[in-house]
Amino acid sequence: MGEPELEAGETTTATRPGRGLAIASLAVGAAGLTLAVATWAAWLVVRPGIVSAWVFSWVTQAFVLVLGALWFALLPISVLALVFGVCAGARTQPGFARIGATLAVVTALLALSGAAVFATTSWRHVGPPVAYFGTGTSGPR
């Protein structure tokens, strides 16, 4: 016996093979954007206190390093979401793929700006957090 014939109104998964990739792009893009915004919020809450208080603790330094690492980790996440979206047809048809690709681009911009801020932040007389782990003051400031 033969395969059943499809009526004009029915669709199969073969007509839209990128549906799963579109949903994956949307999910990864939304998760990445949420993490990027949360990382920026944590940086803005913690960073001014670190700059004004000249006594650094190990916990604070580890927290700053984790925030910097999150920004760098968000870069491949956003690229993955963008690739999923483009493979699902974000350029040709509106839907989940285009939304996911847009979220991926916004995530990439937030992650790049955060990584740049982390890498170029002026640490004044103490250097970057990797180079200085003392908990005491090193003289008058």
Image (spheres, rainbow, N blue to C red):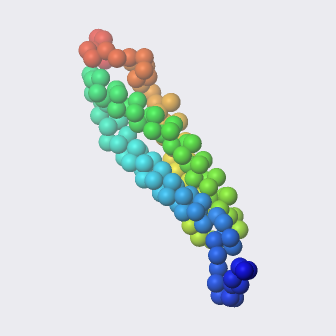
The answer to whether residue 1 is left or right of residue 22 is right
The answer to whether residue 58 is left or right of residue 15 is left
Q: Does 90 sit above or below residue 134?
A: below
Q: Position of residue 63 (x, y in %)?
A: 34, 32
Residue at (40%, 23%) from the top-left corner? Answer: 129
Quadrant of res 104: bottom right
Residue at (64%, 84%) from the top-left corner? Answer: 10
Q: Between residues 33 and 40, which one lies in front from this camera angle?
A: 33
Number of marks present in the image shown: 0
Quadrant of res 88: bottom right
Residue at (56%, 58%) from the top-left corner? Answer: 25
What is the quadrant of the N terminus in the image? Answer: bottom right
Residue at (60%, 60%) from the top-left corner? Answer: 21
Q: Position of residue 110 (x, y in %)?
A: 51, 47
Q: Position of residue 53 (x, y in %)?
A: 27, 27
Using the rendered image of the protein, determine whether residue 20 is visible from the camera's viewpoint: yes
User: Residue reaching furthest top?
Assistant: 139
What is the quadrant of the C terminus in the image? Answer: top left
Q: Between residues 19 and 114, which one lies in front from this camera angle?
A: 19
Q: Between residues 58 and 141, which one lies in front from this camera angle?
A: 58
User: Residue reaching furthest right?
Assistant: 2
User: Residue reaching furthest front?
Assistant: 1
Quadrant of res 56: top left
Q: Does 51 sit above or below residue 136?
A: below
Q: Between residues 11 and 108, which one lies in front from this camera angle?
A: 11
Q: Position of residue 96 (x, y in %)?
A: 56, 67
Using the rendered image of the protein, determine whether residue 106 is visible from the camera's viewpoint: no
Q: Does 8 sit above or below residue 73?
A: below
